[in-house]
Amino acid sequence: MMSSIEIKNNRAKSKKIVKKLIDRYGKEIPVYLNYHKNKKYEFLFAVMMSAQTTDIRVNEVTKVLYKKYKKLSDFANANLKEFEKDIKPVGFYHQKAISVINTARDLIDKFKGEVPNNFDDLVKLRGVGNKTAAVVLGHIWDIPAMAVDTHVNRISNKLFTLNEKNPDVVCEMLKQIVEKKYWVLWNTHIIALGREICLARSPKCSICFLKNLCNFYNI
């Protein structure tokens, strides 16, 4: 873990980074996954299906899926084999199908059909881990939550030299150095950076607007 001095220095740096991220990508929090605003469970399911695939692919699948399964009960009562075929393009479709169907049942049986608005209840849902819970809280409930996916883990380690690969540990470290009101923005804007400039295989360090603040570049 970080020392108190490291935390203090990284907090100061994170403020500068956030400012530059906002200058580049704006103050608004982008939502990459499509869903109907009055059906919060659709966003939850989309996030669950987004593991190990792209948001574009998920949106292609849900465009059809959400027309076929119009109510939460439709998901809860779905035939597993048929549902697997419906979501096959997102990959890992067998486990994802089981998770979505069981989560739909949990929402009906335990939460009166509503998506929980707190972390502890969200992670009780089958198929919902820390990252999914954080994304849901931040996007549909507007509750500050730090979500650490592959982009955030990789790039945050470069910016601050956290020397940590475990996303749960990185999440706790980022909570110490990024202002709480920017937790959701950190996730969305770092993802944007990872897709545009800080590519995993060939980062465009020379044109990066954060290079002067990046430990990886300066070392």
Image (cartoon, helix red, strand yellow):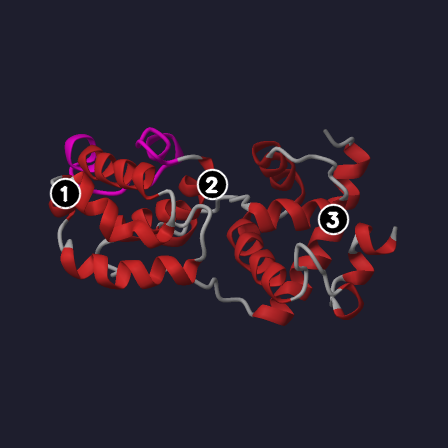
| Whether label 3 touches label 2, CB < 8 Å | no
Q: Quadrant of the N terminus?
A: top right
Quick one: label 1 or label 2, which is nearer the N terminus? Answer: 1
Label 1 residue SS: loop
Disc marking residue 158: 3
The residue type indicated by label 3 comes to Lys
* Crowd rating for badge 2 (residues with CA inside 10 Å; few <14, some 14–19, many 20+): many
Q: With 22 as the anchor, is 4 left or right in this view? A: right
| Whether label 1 touches label 2, CB < 8 Å | no
Residue position for label 2: 131
Q: Which residues are magenta?
A: 107-128
Placement of 138 over or under 165, stated as above or below = below
The residue type indicated by label 1 comes to Ala
Which residue, as the protein is rendered here, is positioned at the far right?
A: 219
Label 3 residue SS: helix
Disc marking residue 38: none
Q: Is residue 210 visible?
A: yes
Disc marking residue 78: 1
Q: Is residue 69 inside the magenta stretch?
A: no
> What residue is shown at x 74% (from left), y 62% (from top)?
210
